[in-house]
């Protein structure tokens, strides 16, 4: 039986257009966009007064992830339900691998984590810890068979996830040959490790020392090093969670040279600052991310970089640990605080509110940053990331007039705090559809765990024009440069 819907009377916004239009959906796919569409045989949905955006794509999540001797508070069920409430219909989670073990084992584990739980569509990035012969032989199969077309290399977290420069370079070379995109966590892990030990030896144990032992120079240095290696390998590079002017400068310089270097930042770096780590009573632990929150002036640099196209995407870096019992593992030793925070549900609304409502970016840039750019970079476009005939009907009906405050009392994560507690936001997703089915309807969850589908993704750049960087002489199109 045909499953037909017509969304009527909304303002349909993509990264390149805005119009008052109806959208017809048949069996999960958009089949018509226009005025007064035929509603025969279809359920009609009133979107008057609402924006209709493409579903958000979160390119950076850690669900059900072990870290620092514990496991994130949120898994693929609570994490994707919260994501859907927040306007996200697709996410790409990081699949961690173990040195010396087949990559296929890690991918199988991640499939098992998501199966029967996810309520939105999802893909995986694959971590490369050591580019030995076996890993290099297996990677092409993961790319071809699993559609995992993005590989993650950590330049920090010494003795845990950190890879050496040889591994980064070999992974970049392979990515160029195979059409994959290498992502880096860019911080100089060796120097950070030294600074952490020095601080602890001096009795500096409070959460603020997490930030002080990871200064922005070390993010800038690693970002520049990764960009240089990507240039040498002639491979594209995506820098995750950019926090500071030092890193933005390196990305801008690489792009000005024509290198295919892309950058992502996250809502926390755009709205919170390092002073949060000094909150009394160990509360600062709630704000421990790596890289750390920076001095407030970096926020303007990040907004400007988003607006100018130096940075292309916004990820949440969702990685939640309860304050009680998990963040508290670092009482008396900041280096034992599990890194990360709950952000998946608020990414879309914070960027709308702090970005569009405050005039820092326009509506089209908003769509590009929270959805379209990630679809293009990560091999999902135009199936995802836009509103077009033939695209999946992943849609967010968004009320821009709602005023509310973010609170742990209202979120749908399991974690016991909100990093954005009390932050005022304009706008809220009202209803969210994934492939034409409501997951959120009138602010109620109506989805089904397990309904989210795994996405095998296309290789980097496949069928997508405009992935060249924006240089001073070129103004090539999206994902914005
Ligand atoms: O602090 C963070 N960002 N935790 C998650 C792991 C990572 O580095 O992305
Ligand atoms: Zn990271
Ligand atoms: Zn992360």
Image: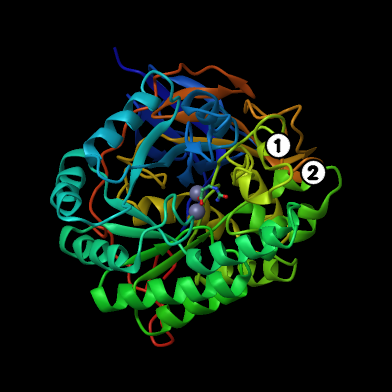
Q: Are marks 2 and 1 in contact (CB under 8 Å)?
A: yes
Q: How is the image coloured?
A: rainbow
Residue neighbourhood size for the residue with mark 2, other residues' Cα within 10 Å, grouped as few (<14), some (14–19), many (≥20): some
Helix, strand or loop at label 1? It is helix
Label 2 or label 1, whichever comes before in sequence order: 2
Quarter holding the N terminus?
top left
Mark sitting on residue 91: none
Residue 427: x %, y % from top left: 70, 42
Left or right, 334 with respect to 86, comes to: right
- Closer to the camera, 304 or 176? 176
Mark sitting on residue 282: 2
| Residue 370 showing in the rendered view | yes
Q: Please give the name of the residue rendered at 16% of the width and 45% of the height, measured from the top-left corner.
A: 144
Residue 308: x %, y % from top left: 54, 73
Residue 372: x %, y % from top left: 43, 52
Residue neighbourhood size for the residue with mark 1, other residues' Cα within 10 Å, grouped as few (<14), some (14–19), many (≥20): many
Q: Which residue is mark 1?
A: 328
* Mark-to-mark CA distance, 2 and 1: 8 Å
Q: Please give the name of the residue rendered at 17% of the width and 58% of the height, measured from the top-left corner.
A: 178
The answer to which image quadrant residue 397 occupies is top right
Left or right, 408 with respect to 128, comes to: right
């Amino acid at each position: 039986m045909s499953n037909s819907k017509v969304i009527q009377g909304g303002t349909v916004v993509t990264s390149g257009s805005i119009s008052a239009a109806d959208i017809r959906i048949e069996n999960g796919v958009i089949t018509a966009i226009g005025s007064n569409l035929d509603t025969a045989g279809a359920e009609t949905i009133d979107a008057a007064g609402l924006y209709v955006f493409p579903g958000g794509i979160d390119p950076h999540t850690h669900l059900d992830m072990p870290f620092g001797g514990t496991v994130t508070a949120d898994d693929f069920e609570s994490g994707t339900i919260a994501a859907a409430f927040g306007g996200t219909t697709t996410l790409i989670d990081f699949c961690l691998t173990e040195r010396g073990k087949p990559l296929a084992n890690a991918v199988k584990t991640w499939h098992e984590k998501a199966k029967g739980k996810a309520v939105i569509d999802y893909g995986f990035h694959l971590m490369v810890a050591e580019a030995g012969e076996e890993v290099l032989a297996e990677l092409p199969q993961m790319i071809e068979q699993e559609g995992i077309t993005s590989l993650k290399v950590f330049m920090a977290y010494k003795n845990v996830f950190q890879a050496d420069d040889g591994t980064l370079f070999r992974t970049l070379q392979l990515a160029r040959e195979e059409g994959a995109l290498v992502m880096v966590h860019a911080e100089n892990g060796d120097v950070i490790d030294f600074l952490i030990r020095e601080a602890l030896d001096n009795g500096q144990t409070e959460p603020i020392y997490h930030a002080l032992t990871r200064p922005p120079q070390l993010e800038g240095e690693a970002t520049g090093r990764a960009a240089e290696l990507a240039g040498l390998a002639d491979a594209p590079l995506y820098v995750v969670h950019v926090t500071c002017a030092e890193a933005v400068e390196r990305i801008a310089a690489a792009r000005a040279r024509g290198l295919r270097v892309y950058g992502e930042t996250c809502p926390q770096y755009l709205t919170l600052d390092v002073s949060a780590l000094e909150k009394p009573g160990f509360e600062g632990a709630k704000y421990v991310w790596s890289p750390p929150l920076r001095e407030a002036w970096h926020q303007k640099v990040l907004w400007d970089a988003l607006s100018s196209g130096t940075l292309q995407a916004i990820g949440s870096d969702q990685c939640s640990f309860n304050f009680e019992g998990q963040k508290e593992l670092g009482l008396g030793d900041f280096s034992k605080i599990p890194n990360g925070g709950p952000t998946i549900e608020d990414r879309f609304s914070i960027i709308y509110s702090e970005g569009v409502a405050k005039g820092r970016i326009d509506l089209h840039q908003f769509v590009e940053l929270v959805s379209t750019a990630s679809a293009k970079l990560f091999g999902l476009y135009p199936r995802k990331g836009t509103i077009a005939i033939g695209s999946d009907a992943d849609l967010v009906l968004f009320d821009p007039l709602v005023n509310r405050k973010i609170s742990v009392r209202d979120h749908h994560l399991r974690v016991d705090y909100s990093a954005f507690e009390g932050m005022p936001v304009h706008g809220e997703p009202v209803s969210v559809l994934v492939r034409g089915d409501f997951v959120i309807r009138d602010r109620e969850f109506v989805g089904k765990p397990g309904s989210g589908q795994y996405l095998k993704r296309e290789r980097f750049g496949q069928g997508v024009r405009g992935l060249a960087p924006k240089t001073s002489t070129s103004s090539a199109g999206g994902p914005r440069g």
